[in-house]
């Protein structure tokens, strides 16, 4: 049966790779993003549905939910770093924290709340977290840590009706616009050096994990944070 999959932030990087992975399965895929041009281009290139929607805007998220019928998989991939500010004021600090929390936590909370009643009995909610939640992440890492905490309670709420809820905590991943051209060769080498397998993550590493989490083999896997980072942060 054809599955329906919604991917927020599906127009670039990790979200786009996840959209391509599910589209290859002949799922009916919806991707969102804030930029009309990239939404339209992605929809055309991947042969999926594109919807312009800012996942931090409750009215836009409600309008998105109204367009959807039954949903099998929700992937909360929208996120990113708030613009850096060197202004020393408390107002600048507050803006940065609010932007990171909105972008990386509230985006997932709002979208999930808007569509959760549409999730089918063997559905999946997959949210993209970050290694920054564990290490030196500042306001961005704090938002991703909160995402994992929220996911645990979401799982307790939705898993009784068969919906699994997991976070993929990604390490350093290339092939995205995340660093907005700001990655230096030295920083790249240092991040690769931290891994056990001595390579950066790829968008397909994350897409493969997302695809597995939505597969029949992962039905007892819920409430978890799955670390996909080549060993850069180990857990036990
Ligand atoms: N790349 C890494 O190394 C890395 C590591 C750990 C975690 N992550 C996480 O992975 C996720 C995907 O990021 P990426 O690396 O693939 O970066 P990316 O290439 O910049 O993709 C981000 C996507 O999210 C969309 N987006 C951003 N804010 C949005 C909003 N408020 N509403 C709707 N769409 C929004 C962007 O489109 P528009 O800008 O047009 O809206 C774009 O499609 C993020 O949650 C990020 O925090 C990335």
Image (cartoon, rainbow, N blue to C red):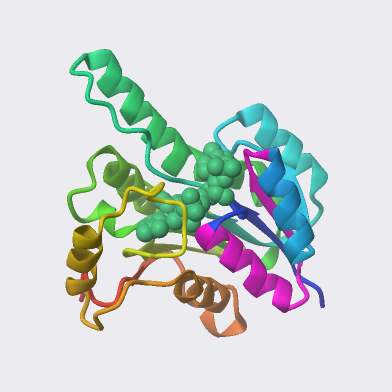
Which quadrant would residue 110 be assigned to in this image? top right
- Residue 32 on the magenta span: yes
Q: Quick one: 206 or 198, which is closer to the camera?
A: 198
> Which residue corresponds to the image point at 30% horizontal and 32% vertical from the top-left?
84
Q: Please tell me whether residue 72 is drawn above or below residue 91 in the rendered image.
A: below
Q: Please tell me whether residue 30 is drawn above or below residue 27 in the rendered image.
A: above
Residue 135, how many percent across, how many down? 18, 54
- Residue 44 on the magenta span: no
Tell me which segment is drawn in magenta: 13-35
Does residue 34 appear left or right of residue 232 in this picture? right
Tell me, yes or no, if residue 154 can be seen here.
no
Does residue 89 appear left or right of residue 15 in this picture? left
Residue 34, how many percent across, how many down? 62, 38
Q: Quick one: 10 or 156, which is closer to the camera?
A: 10
Q: Quadrant of the C terminus?
A: bottom left
Tell me, yes or no, if residue 232 can be seen here.
yes
Residue 86, how many percent across, how many down? 22, 25
Q: Please tell me whether residue 160 is drawn above or below residue 34 in the rendered image.
A: below
Q: Quadrant of the N terminus?
A: bottom right
> Which residue corresponds to the image point at 53% horizontal and 71% vertical from the top-left?
207
> Which residue corresponds to the image point at 68% horizontal and 54% vertical from the top-left?
31
Which quadrant would residue 170 be assigned to in this image? bottom left
> Which residue corresponds to the image point at 81% horizontal and 73% vertical from the top-left?
2
Does residue 200 appear left or right of residue 190 in this picture? right
Residue 212, how many percent across, how many down? 54, 79
How many numbered discs sit on the rendered protein? 0
Q: Please tell me whether residue 97 is drawn above or below residue 147 in the rendered image.
A: above
Does residue 44 appear left or right of residue 137 in this picture? right
């Amino acid at each position: 049966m054809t599955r329906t999959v919604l991917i927020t932030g599906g127009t670039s990087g990790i979200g786009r790779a996840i959209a391509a992975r599910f589209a290859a399965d002949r799922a009916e895929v919806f991707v969102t993003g804030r930029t009309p041009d990239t939404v339209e281009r992605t929809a055309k290139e991947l042969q999926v549905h594109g919807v312009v929607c800012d996942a931090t805007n409750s009215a836009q998220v409600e309008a998105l939910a109204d367009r959807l019928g039954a949903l099998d998989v929700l992937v909360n991939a929208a996120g990113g770093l708030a613009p850096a500010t060197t202004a020393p004021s408390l107002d600048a600090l507050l803006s940065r924290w609010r932007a990171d929390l909105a972008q990386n936590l509230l985006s997932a909370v709002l979208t999930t709340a808007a569509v959760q009643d549409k999730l089918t009995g063997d559905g999946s909610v997959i949210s993209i977290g970050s290694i920054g939640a564990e290490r030196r992440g500042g306001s961005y890492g704090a938002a991703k840590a909160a995402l994992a905490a929220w996911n645990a309670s979401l799982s307790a709420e939705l898993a009784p009706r068969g919906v699994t809820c997991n976070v993929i905590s990604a390490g350093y991943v290339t092939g995205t616009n995340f660093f907005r051209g700001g990655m230096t060769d030295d920083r790249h080498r240092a991040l690769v050096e931290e891994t056990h397998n001595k390579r950066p993550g790829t968008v397909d590493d994350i897409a493969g994990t997302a695809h597995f989490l939505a597969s029949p083999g992962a039905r007892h896997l819920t409430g978890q944070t799955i670390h996909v980072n080549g060993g850069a942060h180990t857990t036990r």
